[in-house]
Image: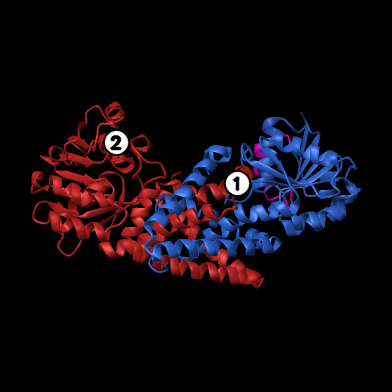
Chain colours: A blue, B red
């Protein structure tokens, strides 16, 4: 299946990986990449000589059959306003933002009746940023959540499903608010914990930094992610994140009590439960077989 | 440099990796491996045909120049009592346990005057267990902490340093109690947090398990570790772990407050601090360049 002309707006880690995957899998007849400025163009040109690169977003989307917003979530609405007049009415417009409720709330009114809109969130990424960190296999085995609202047209959902499937992702469908609640637990909270764990480590001589083994390396990898990006994500999904933090604090308090009371049986049960759930995840989630 | 006859007691993940590394690097003239029973012998024989395998621990250590205890920490003292009479007085005896205060407290009185004793803790491992998970490069780039006590002989410390260096590790020296305080922060706490994070995830339909991306995969990898092993570690380093949990709970509470108050500047600063420290770790710790 091909998707005609695909316009990627924002060639960072996710947008760049999308462009590389589209090219490698031959799912776009024509690939257009928009960026705010030309800084990244030489690097993109070297890997994607056939792509059309532009800093004019209206030009980028005109004639596009699929438009994917890969820019920071708080800049999406302003960008859509710039290009909405140039969209084909049959174009599928989607995004890759980590929060879906607020994105859908802002973009749906701008796009309804002008194109086919549906939000997306591929559950893949990395702590690196920019096109240089992009890779064509980023979405292989990853879940891609698409989030229809009550007005989403069937055609939008169907084409978004086909688009992500063509990139090697496993599509899951749920309302934006359900997405936000789940992702607060499985992505946003783990990120905040990694940052808190790093900040909690005793300061002082650097010696400790070089003592750490693979455990700390992996539990904190995401703390190297962009502080700006994550501040935006937290703001956009604040309520669900606060709820996730509250229930997690209760869980860590429960663990603390087991250790304080020297309850070996309780602790063993706690660790066994985690072991079993984590092992099941490793078996059932194809992404857990990939390496970071 | 070679170390004469090296006896590895317990061919699990760490002991097995030690044996493979010793063989690959040619640092042992003779390699002896003791296990409680012969279950693992065929697999070991296939990879290390030159090693002498035995289920008789006294036989294993007699004639050994270096003896490395790679068995669970709570079984070490009983094992030492079985073989202490067969040690050469010049033998270096060390271990690979994750806690050093209690190990040193139990083993030093048994070994002082009978051999050269010093505790070790290579900061390398994995969530898998057993010889099948062992690898010859496990210690390359890892820190190996050795923990002299007030009675440790200079010769013990020097030979332990040479031993771990020959295996590709970076040796750090500190008292057992300092080790336990630091490792509670950089290894034991991250492990408990990973388990708590997994246990806190909403139960119910399995769907969520397969939605998770690389963030949850890596932050929780260590939660797949052996529940029995980690219950023992927590018991053996309980005081330092309780302290680490307390300060971490304060840190997560601070982060929670920033988000509750919608303090974007404070949150950005918090995440920036974590980003900077984590990035510095990734630059300065060679292990952070290896993959799990």
Tag 2 residue: B20
Element type at mark 2: helix
> What residue lies at 38% left-to-right and 57% top-to-bottom?
A210
Crowd band around label 1 with a 10 angstrom C-alpha radius: few (<14), some (14–19), many (20+): many
Please report whichever mark, 2 or 1, sits nearer to the chain's N-terminal start.
2
Horizontal and vertical percent for residue B288? Answer: 44, 50
| Chain of the residue under label 2 | B
> What residue lies at 61% left-to-right and 68% top-to-bottom?
B267
> What residue lies at 23% left-to-right and 38% top-to-bottom?
B36
Image quadrant where residue A290 sits = top right
- In the displayed structure, does residue A59 sit left or right of residue A143? right
Q: What stretch is highlighted in magenta?
A: A34-50
Tag 1 residue: B212
Horizontal and vertical percent for residue A136? Answer: 63, 37
Residue A95 falls within the magenta-colored stretch: no
Residue A38 falls within the magenta-colored stretch: yes
Horizontal and vertical percent for residue A150? Answer: 84, 50
Image quadrant where residue A88 sits = top right
Element type at mark 1: loop
- Residues at discs 2 and 1 both on one chain: yes
């Amino acid at each position: 299946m091909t998707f005609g002309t695909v316009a990627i707006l924002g060639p960072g880690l996710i947008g760049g990986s999308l462009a590389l995957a589209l090219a490698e899998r031959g799912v776009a007849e024509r690939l257009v990449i928009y960026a705010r400025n030309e800084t990244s163009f030489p690097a993109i040109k070297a890997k994607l000589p056939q792509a059309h690169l532009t800093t004019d977003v209206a030009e980028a989307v005109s004639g596009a059959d699929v438009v994917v917003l890969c820019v920071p979530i708080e800049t999406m609405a302003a960008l859509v306003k710039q290009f909405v007049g140039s969209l084909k009415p049959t174009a599928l417009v989607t995004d890759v933002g980590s929060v879906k409720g607020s994105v859908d709330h802002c973009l749906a009114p701008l796009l309804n009746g002008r194109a086919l809109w549906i939000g997306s969130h591929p559950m893949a990424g990395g702590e690196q940023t920019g096109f240089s960190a992009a890779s064509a296999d980023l979405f292989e085995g990853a879940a891609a959540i698409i989030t229809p609202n009550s007005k989403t047209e069937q055609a939008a959902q169907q084409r978004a499903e086909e688009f992500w499937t063509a990139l090697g992702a496993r599509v899951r469908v749920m309302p934006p608010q359900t997405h936000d609640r789940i992702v607060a637990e499985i992505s946003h909270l783990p990120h905040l914990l990694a940052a808190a764990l790093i900040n909690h480590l005793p300061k002082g001589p650097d010696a400790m930094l070089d003592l750490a083994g693979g455990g700390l390396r992996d539990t904190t990898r995401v703390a190297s992610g962009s502080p700006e990006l994550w501040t935006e994500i937290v703001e956009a999904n604040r309520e669900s994140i606060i709820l996730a933090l509250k229930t997690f604090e209760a869980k860590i308090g429960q663990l603390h009590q087991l250790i304080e009371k020297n309850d070996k049986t309780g602790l063993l049960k706690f660790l066994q439960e985690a072991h079993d759930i984590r092992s099941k995840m490793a078996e059932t989630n194809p992404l857990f077989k990939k390496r970071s």
